[in-house]
Every structure is written in structure tokens, then in C-alpha cells.
Amino acid sequence: MREIRPYSCTKTNQKIFDFIIQNGLTDKRLLDVGSGEGYFLQKLGDYLSLQGASPAEHLYACDLNPSFHQYREISCVPFDARKGLPFVDDGFDFVTSIEVIEHLENAYGFVHELHRVTKKGGKVFVTTPNLLNINSRLRAFHSGFALLFNPLPLREKVPAFCEGHIHPLNLYYLGYAFYRAGFCQVRIHYDRMKKSGAFLTLMFYPLIRLAFAGYQARSKRRMREIFEENQPLLKEINSFAALTARTVIVEGVK
């Protein structure tokens, strides 16, 4: 069997893997939504095997195209993004979805589904391209499109899942989707710093911070209650990490 390929960056997979392992997996159930060929699940399965646990008893997979699945230790079931996930409520301790949500027509409904199938106290991890890094902001400034997003066919029928990126969600709106879905805690993480992003941020950071301070002052006057409620997310928008990171990771605790 040929080597299983990741459909997303290996360092993004490693970051989620580290989060899962820190929380323990040998007594838990994990669902990977949009599992592709099964690269991430194989990584987890190898870990479980070293711990003397059976991957098939802990890992579950679903994907639009289960025929792509290559990790033979577990099966992959199909799911239709318009119909929801084919799993019962409160079934998993962890649910992961790596570089999937930007391909979906209904991203908010998708987050609600991730919440539904997660146990009370369980965790969901969703990753997506970081549209708020400085490279992406500058591209949007001159083109109108964030990094990794481009014009789309207008007359061609677009499926609920598209090979291209059709739903740009920056870290604020993805975090908002988690809150709206009912997660009691929402945390923002990042995978790695882009060197070019760090260089550009050092050039523009004073201007960004000054302009954002003005925005904050106006927001406090006009909508203080909403502004205060949003602080956990607003503090991330112009953080050095947000301005330099390649990928954003949103963690929700049910």
C-alpha cells in the first residue's frame, strides 16, 4: 500500500495531535471529520498501538469520499454536508476537522453538528487558513481576496463541499460560530509562524496597533456591553500570533 498523504500541512496535523495526546486518548473516542486518506488517524493509530490500545476501538472517520480512505485499521463512513453527520448525539470525547470548513457551503451548521456529536466536557478542534495574517491582509487590500481564496465559478452548480475554498472565515467568525453552537469555552491557537509574516508585521505593527486602538475606543463608546463580551476574541485579532501564523485552530469545550 502506498504511503498515506496528508491533505493539509503536516505541522498542522502535528499541532492537533499534540493537543489530543496531552488530554489522553487511550480511554476516549475520537471522530475525524473530513479525514481524507487517513493521515491524521494513522498518526493517532500508531500512537495508540504503542500504548497497547486498538485504534479501531478509539478512532472513527467520515468523509465526503470514503473511497479515498487508505488507513485500513478503521473504516470511513460517508457524510453529506447538507444532511449532517451520521452519528448519534454526545458520542465522542474529541472531534477534529482539519482544513475542511473553508470548503463547506454551510460552515455555521457544520459547527453545530460538531457540537452535537461531542460529549459534555468533550473538545472539538477545527483548523482553517488564517485570513488575518499580514500576508493575507495585504493580498486582500489590493485584490479583494485573502490568501488561498480566489474567484469562483458563478454559473456552475457548486456542491455542499467544494475542492476549492468557498467559505472564508477568519478567527473571529469561526470563534463566533463556536459560541453560537453552544460551546462553553472557546480558545484560539495557531500552528506556526510565517517568516515573511513576521517581517511584514514588524513593518506595519505600530500602525495596526494605533488604528486598532482608535477602533476600540469608538466601540467602547457605542456598544460597550457587546465590546466587553467579545474581548476573548477581539484580543486575538491583532495579536502578533494572529498577524504571523499560517493556520488558525479553534478549540471548543462543550
Image (cartoon, rainbow, N blue to C red):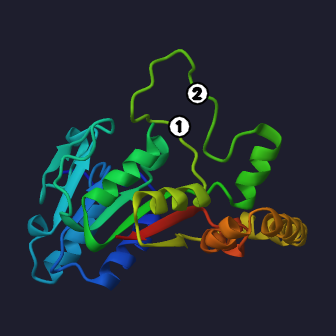
Q: Quadrant of the C terminus?
A: bottom left
| Residue 35: mark in rendering | none
Q: Is residue 222 left or right of residue 42?
A: right
Q: Secondary structure at mark 1?
A: loop
In front of the other: 120 or 101: 120
Q: Please report the residue visible at 46 percent of the width from the left and 41 percent of the height from the top.
A: 103
Q: Position of residue 202 (x, y in %)?
A: 83, 72
- Within 10 Å of disc 1 (Cα), the crowding (few <14, some 14-19, many 20+) is many
Q: Position of residue 92 (x, y in %)?
A: 21, 66
Q: Secondary structure at mark 2?
A: loop
| Residue 166: mark in rendering | 1
Number of numbered labels in the structure image: 2
| Residue 152: mark in rendering | 2
Q: Is residue 241 left or right of residue 9?
A: right
In front of the other: 22 or 80: 80
Q: Please report the residue visible at 46 percent of the width from the left and 61 percent of the height from the top.
A: 178
Q: Please report the residue visible at 33 percent of the width from the left and 39 percent of the height from the top.
A: 81
Residue kind at label 1, given as amino acid type: Ile
Lower position in the chain sequence, tag 2 or tag 1:
2
Quarter where residue 135 is shown: bottom right
- Within 10 Å of disc 2 (Cα), the crowding (few <14, some 14-19, many 20+) is few
Q: Position of residue 8 (x, y in %)?
A: 44, 55
- Between the residue at mark 2 and the residue at mark 1, the CA separation in whole angstroms equals 8 Å
Given contact means CB atoms under 8 Å apart, are the residues at marks 2 and 1 in contact?
yes
Q: Please report the residue visible at 30 percent of the width from the left and 53 percent of the height from the top.
A: 33
Whether residue 159 is situated above or below residue 208 in the rendered picture: above
Residue kind at label 2, given as amino acid type: Leu
Q: Position of residue 3 (x, y in %)?
A: 27, 55
